[in-house]
Amino acid sequence: MKIEKLIKETLENLLIKLGSEYSDIVIDMRDEDTYTVNIKSEDATTLIGHHGETIYSLQHVLKTLCWSKSKKKDEFNIILDVDNYRQRQEDRVIAIAEKQVAFTRKTGRPQKLPPMSPYFRRVVHIRLMEPEFDDIETLSNGEGDQRHIIIKPA
């Protein structure tokens, strides 16, 4: 069975069992082993939960079920989104980082971003590794919930 079909069927069954209404499930490949799954739903706030807690839990359950049914096991990753909630979050985090890059370039002083999850720190590190930011360096600092990124001149 194709991974996309497995993901869609598994997610549809989960949503039915949760009693969550949805109008569509869109699956795209982000890279060779990562699938982005976006649920279009009128019930988005329930599926997202407080600060995205429900969506992250649902993503974990979906991954675990798909891995157990797949012959590939954990050779693929799934990023679950609802009505592009996570994409909007990524865009906001990148915008904040780029604003701090501009300030760092202007002043030459390192800038500290607010604490964020490992996922969003990775998004920022990857974005700021692009050629247009070759004059900038990033590093993660701090522990646990206080872990944050420092942007400084290279």
Image (cartoon, grey):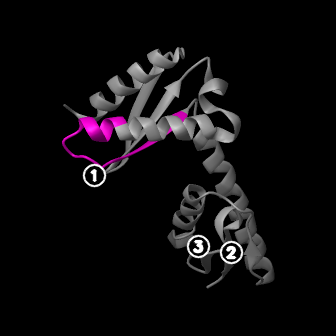
Give the vertical position of 123 relative to 52 (above or below): below
Give the vertical position of 153 relative to 71 (above or below): below
Give the vertical position of 123 relative to 45 (above or below): below
- Element assignment for label 2: strand
- Compare marks 2 and 1 and give the one earlier in the sequence: 1
Residue bearing the label numbered 1? 75
Q: Which residues are magenta?
A: 65-81
Residue bearing the label numbered 3? 133
Pick the front one: 58 or 140: 58
Give the vertical position of 135 relative to 87 (above or below): below
Residue bearing the label numbered 2? 150
Is 148 within the magenta?
Answer: no
Residue 86 position, x and y percent, is 59, 42
Rendered image quadrant of residue 68: top left
Q: Are marks 1 and 3 in contact (CB under 8 Å)?
A: no
Seen at 56% across and 70% down, the residue is 132
- Mark 2 belongs to which amino acid? Ile
- Mark 1 belongs to which amino acid? Glu
Is 73 within the magenta?
Answer: yes
Residue 43 position, x and y percent, is 62, 19
- Would residue 57 be found to the left or right of residue 45 on screen? left
